[in-house]
Amino acid sequence: MSIWVNVGSIVVGVTLIIYILMQIVNRKMTESQSVLWLFMGGIAIILGFFPGIINWVAKQLGIWYPPSIFLLFLVIGILFIVLKNTIVTSVQNNQLNELFIQVALLKRDNQELRAELNALKKEGDNNENTSI
């Protein structure tokens, strides 16, 4: 591989890591969300410094064109990120549904209590009017 590909891989990895760390500092991303992105940035840096890893892994897996293994790693990494985000979204969706149910029950309880309070006020007003 060309030295420019190695340098590009290192620059992309370092840029990704710096960007993700900035997002964590600015509280736009949590640590648990950033782990896989930081891992992918680290892999890009390692592959930039040691490009022979790509050839070795491709040879072990029987892949004829070694740079395609890099794309395979990227796709697998992105699939893990999508899977993790899908799980988080599903959990949050379930929590949101539970919250909707709790709010509906609290509204119903609130309406019942207001009706009881209004009934007690009317009853109190009637008692005052009849005693005069």
Image (cartoon, rainbow, N blue to C red):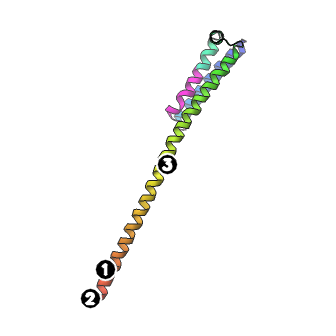
Which mark's residue is nearer the viewer, 1 or 3?
3
Residue 85 to residue 116: above or below: above
Residue positioned most to the left? 131
In the rendered view, does 33 fall on the left or right side of 102?
A: right
Residue nearer the viewer, 2 or 36: 36
Q: Is residue 34 magenta?
A: yes
State the residue position of label 1: 124
x and y percentages locating residue 60 in the rendered image: 62, 10
Type of amino acid under label 2:
Ser
Tell me if label 2 and label 3 are in contact, CB under 8 Å. no
In the rendered view, does 129 fall on the left or right side of 45?
A: left
| Dot 2 or dot 1, earlier in sequence | 1
Type of amino acid under label 1:
Gly
| Dot 2 or dot 3, earlier in sequence | 3
Badge 1 marks a residue whose secondary structure is: helix
In the rendered view, does 27 fall on the left or right side of 12?
A: left
Alpha carbon separation for disc pair 1 and 3? 41 Å
Look at 58% across and 27% down and name the residue there: 18
Q: State which quadrant residue 1 falls in.
A: top right
Q: Residue 131, which numbered label?
A: 2
Alpha carbon separation for disc pair 2 and 1? 11 Å
Mark 2: few, some, or many residues within 10 Å (few <14, many ≥20)?
few
Magenta segment, which residues?
27-42
Q: Residue 96, which numbered label?
A: 3
x and y percentages locating residue 71 in the rendered image: 67, 21
Badge 2 marks a residue whose secondary structure is: helix
- Picture quarter with the C terminus: bottom left
Look at 66% across and 19% down and name the residue there: 70
Q: Is residue 92 magenta?
A: no
Residue nearer the viewer, 29 or 113: 113
